[in-house]
Amino acid sequence: MAEQPQLQLQWSAQLSVAAARTSLPGDKILLPPSALEALLSASSNRAAENARRDLPAYDPYNSATYSAYRQAESQYQDQKQQLPYPLTFRLVNPESGRVVYAGIREFSAEEGEVVLSPFLRETLGLSEQQHESKEASMTVDGEEGVNGVHRPTITVHARQLDKGTFVKLRPLEAGYDPEDWKALLEQYLRQNYTTLTNGAVLIVPGGRGMGGKKEEFRFLVDGFKPDVDGVCIVDTDLEVDIEALNEEQARETLKRIAAKMTKLPGSNHGSSVGGEMDLFKPQEGRVLPGEYVDYRLSSWGRGQPLEIELAGEDDGEVDLLVSPFSATQRAKPRVDEHVFAEFEGRPTKRIRLEPSNVELENAEALYVSVHAFSASELQTNGTANGETPSSGPVHFTLTARHQDAAAKVSDTQGVEIDAPPNEGDVRCKNCGQFVPQRTLMLHENFCLRNNILCPQGCGQVFQKRSPAFEAHWHCPHDTAYGNTTLSHQKHDTLFHPTEVLHCSDCGTRETFPSLPALSHHRTTTCPAKVILCRFCHLEVPQEGDPDVPNAEALLSGLTPHELADGARTTECHLCNKIVRLRDMETHLKNHDLDRFERPAPHACRNANCGRTLDVCSHSGDTRAGTRMGQGPGNDIGLCSVCFGPLYVSMYDPEGKALRRRIERRYLQQLVSGCGKAWCRNEYCKTGRQHLGVSGGGTAVSTKEALPMIKPFLDALAKGVKETSLHFCVDEKSQRQRMLAEMLAAEDGGVGGKGGYGLEWCVGALEAEGGDVDAARLWLRNWAPAKGEGRR
């Protein structure tokens, strides 16, 4: 028998719509905490009804009936405190009868209120303007006018929706042509929507278009499968069909796409493609008005000043924008989002970047963009609009080079400018040119009659009644000036907009007086600024509240996203402790301090042995064996293995008997040899044969051996521990010693400035069992390099 459908969650309430304190995305709402309690109570009642719905009549003599009741009780206990997932609601505006479905964000609204997202407000017909007008029209006399506030009321019903399998979207405007519909809709719907409502208008923000402006796509939701008013789009595969509203819109869309294709970057009528930029190699290109050409400079001398120069065809038509590409700056420069810019109306624009500039710290590359203003981007502010930007492409030349020191010196030495070029020349007070003294009167008469010096003090000289003088302007608000109407319009657009600017990417209450100020916000504190998170290694918004900065984020140098993402824990690869990701850097610096203070291991005095006296451990402890009571057990500098054959249980306070045993050991090695195939001991007959020492093939007599070993015995008698001993060892120990000498010879040699000391290399190989790669890793983790100390 097929299972009967689960009962719907029965809950509804009438709530007043609160002013949006935060920007809720998509179809999300905020409900009061009491709504959560009521929903849990309704869920408990629903669970009880579901459990009792199919129960047979109770028969105390029927074990099957008893079992069914036990199962129903268990089901009730499991479901009574569980809410459906996802939790969806049906919102109704009683005044207009409009209906929309929504998902829950939090239960944090004030009691008796509900907070709606902008999408839900628009769909229900609750615009902010209507809300404000009602507030203004109310008085304090009536009940609705308490405190002068009147809020609209909506009805909220708990309603479980079917999973959607198909949705039809109809564009409300012609010309929509993003690169990837699937990725755009998947990302936006997954992050912002729980439900879709038939007949609602879905607004999907796109990326930046060819002109650098952010695109916005508006769709009419026109049908689902199953055929219902609303569907749930969580945990389901949703097929999307995008269909034009009518044939005329379809034709217009194809026409716009075809026109767009003719102006694609790299085409005959479009802007240049841009790409990689090289030092000292000029880049020639063209840019259409309203578009950008992006270049990337990947390598330059980080210790030298860098100068980027842009030369255009006409004064002030193209602008130079620069932004570093780093973990904290990922966006390409745009007029409203850049770090460095040059907008002045000069034929040649330059941006000079000093190596000490903090914005270039940790920069992987530089993004350089060339932009040309279009007529739609300009404002007049009351000026005569007699000049408009050209509609065709603007040609330019872009160069990046290091500043020439000689040229810089010559530029700074401007003391010779006031000196006349020829003896007897004097400067004209009107135009500033040098003329001969004898013709000064004639020149001044002509110059004053035909030329005029700018009365605003910029020093420029114009011919009277010339178009250039008529178009010459000075900004009344700052020190900017120019010679064309276009440059005046562009200056007003950038620095004196007609309206106060707001950031469209975040909900900050801060306003901005100019586009450079807005750009500074978007490249510094804007929550929507894209960064490369150092913990999740993904490009994500930095988040946070620009109006109330997070003190911990400011002190730690992390972004709010990194501060939250860095709260995840991981295991330290050195000490196996659980550490937060954002504290890992400090934790590893503590390991560095321990590494600098760690005592060096004591290598065995035996020149053929690859062990240490105190036994090094895998965790970096250079005294692990001694701590466990497995020390060398002698004071002559031999490890416990090498000292074992020399040990006897007799009283020998002066060490004379020990020196005799060492002497006998040497004589036995030189006269008889050890007979081991791997022996490379130069004080052993077998080892001398394997090493090819001169005379190694013949036995060494006792008379010849005594002078050879006398220096070692004298050093033992004097207590000098720097003198090595030479005893035959096992193959593994001898191999570890040879590998340790090879490791110590790397990075500068045994006596060089780099690399690690021989004793550290011996300890590393001992701790890692002779594995060279593991020993190198052990040295990096636990051993200080030569010349390395506390920083």
Image: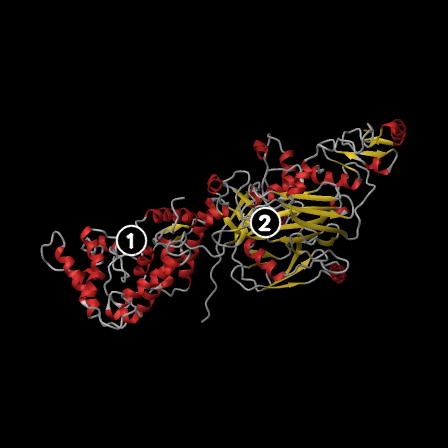
Badge 1 marks a residue whose secondary structure is loop
Amino acid type at mark 2: Gly
**Closer-to-camera residue (536/311):** 311
Whether residue 204 is visible: no
Residue in the image at 27% along x and 62% along y: 608
Q: Position of residue 548 (x, y in %)?
A: 52, 38
How many numbered circles does the render carry? 2
The reply to whether the C-beta atoms of the residues labelled 1 and 2 are less than 8 Å apart is: no
Q: Looking at the image, is 132 positioned above or below residue 748? A: above
Amino acid type at mark 1: Pro
- Label of residue 301 in the image: 2
**Closer-to-camera residue (365/555):** 365
Q: Position of residue 738 (x, y in %)?
A: 33, 63
Q: Position of residue 175 (x, y in %)?
A: 72, 58
Which image quarter: residue 145? top right
Badge 2 marks a residue whose secondary structure is loop
Judge left or right: residue 776 versus residue 467.
left
Q: Mark 2, residues whose alpha carbon is within 10 Å: few (<14), some, or many (≥20)? A: few
Instruction: Please tell me which of labels 1 and 2 falls first in the chain.
Output: 2
Q: Mark 1, residues whose alpha carbon is within 10 Å: few (<14), some, or many (≥20)? A: many
- Label of residue 601 in the image: 1
Which image quarter: residue 727? bottom left
Q: Looking at the image, is 698 positioned above or below residue 576? A: below
